[in-house]
Amino acid sequence: MTYLEALNRRYSVKKFNKEKKVPAELIANILEAAKLSASSLGLQPYELIVVESEAVKEQLIPAFYNPSQISTCSHLIAIVSKNNIGSEYIGSYFNHISETREIPLEELGPFRQSISSHIDRLSEEEIMIWADKQSYIVLGNLMFAAALENVDTCPMEGFKQVEIDRILNIDITKEKVAVTLALGYRADEDHFQRFKKVRKPNEHLFKFI
Amino acid sequence: MTYLEALNRRYSVKKFNKEKKVPAELIANILEAAKLSASSLGLQPYELIVVESEAVKEQLIPAFYNPSQISTCSHLIAIVSKNNIGSEYIGSYFNHISETREIPLEELGPFRQSISSHIDRLSEEEIMIWADKQSYIVLGNLMFAAALENVDTCPMEGFKQVEIDRILNIDITKEKVAVTLALGYRADEDHFQRFKKVRKPNEHLFKFI
């Protein structure tokens, strides 16, 4: 299967086969793809909560407007955006760069300065909007990798923010659930899998100059 | 090369090999991956401008804070987010669903109604923030597909909004450049390709519950 075949096979699952769990090894690969996502300035302003517990999935059902994916999926991943990207966060990022690449911290000073002054200019709300966008690159990587692993998914934005943040113990002073992704295997009776994909024709989507 | 090897090989290129162009066939595959991106409610609130022209790339250089990618890349893709997702846009989307899936328009009424009432509740600014997030899924797909095609990339947010929108003839009453992606082949002298990847350790990135 080429990657374009895998992406063509992908669709937003409405109902998963509740009996079929995604093997831990595939989940690990898919999460590794998320980890390797690009992020603005390399800051990775997010965290991923991987819900495996049936009890927690059960609790989450009323937090979603379309509950059929949550009640049938194998795993639910919540991508949590962070806006507490202050000097402590940036400092620990630079310590990590320095250790990983064996570059003295002092040499990284100008790069650190430019990142700090960029972030310092943003309000907390602007940082959250920026962080959310980075979280969506992660969402893209998760769906792409899952498709390559023949694992089905459904990205879900339709949740009650207060409810989901509460159930997942989110510290709402500095983070929030940006978006979620249900993973599993399509139920045979989910007839959406047999619908033709609807996409804008190329002439409305691409412009070459 | 597995997809995880490809993602590990990927890095944000600082300087491309100016002499090496990405073949049209690979660009077409990478764009097809963008087209197959998931988007909220399937609305694809974006357009992609693919800049091949050397003259336009030249014009764009001063619009970027880090110009070395723009002056050396083979192609530059600008993902343009749209906030004019009104009844006309949604109407044409539903005509398209009806034709593609051979479902009478009337049967799609309730789905259309729920999408319209959701979008109607959002301000123009909120629609743009929502559209931007969808554009970042496209960005993720473009980078992922390029990595699989052994094509190098650099995602770039650091541009002067007014300048880039003007040069690309964006109608700023309803759209804006959300983010850009430079594509090409890494220059051998770009020493960033030999740096170790810096990522948060798993215990800071993932939480399993």
Image: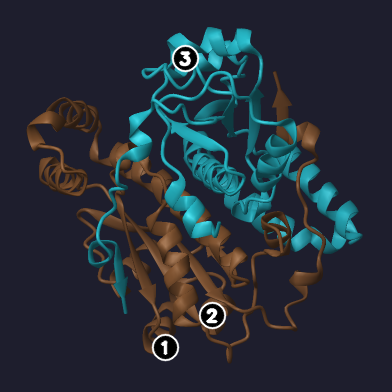
Chain colours: A brown, B cyan
Q: In this rendering, would A184 be left or right of A119?
A: right
Q: CA distance from mark 2 to mark 1?
A: 10 Å
Q: How far is the residue under mark 2 from the one under mark 3?
A: 44 Å
Q: Which residue is mark 3?
A: B162
Residue position marked by numbered label 2 in the rendering: A73
Q: Residue reaching furthest front?
A: B188
The residue at the point 45 percent across, 19 percent down is B161
Q: Report, in whole angstroms, how far the alpha carbon at label 3 lies from the one at label 1.
A: 49 Å
Work out whether B188 lies above or below A150.
above
Looking at the image, residue B189 sits to the left or right of residue A91; the answer is right
Name the one closer to the observer, A139 or B73: B73
The residue lying at 17 percent from left, 32 percent from top is: A112
Q: Say which of A165 and B56 sits in front.
A: B56
Q: Amino acid at mark 3?
A: Val
Question: Which residue: 54% across, 80% down?
Answer: A73
Sequence-earlier tag: 2 or 1: 1
Image coords of residue A132 (percent x, y): 39, 47
A203 relative position to A96: left or right? right
Is the same chain shared between marks 2 and 3? no
Vertical placement of A69 versus B131: above or below? below
Kind of element beneath mark 1: helix
Q: Inspect the image, locate mark 1, and give the three-letter code of the amino acid beneath it.
A: Glu
Residue type (three-letter) at the residue carrying disc 2: Cys
Q: Are marks 2 and 1 on the same chain?
A: yes
Q: Which mark is on residue A54?
A: 1
**Callout 3 secondary element:** helix
Examine the rendering and report whether any part of residue A136 can be seen: no
Tell me how many marks there are. Answer: 3
In this view, the residue in front, B27 or A65, is: B27
The quarter of the displayed image where residue B68 is located: top left
Question: Which part of the image, by quadrant, shows the N terminus of chain A?
Answer: bottom right
> In the rendered image, is residue B2 in sight?
yes
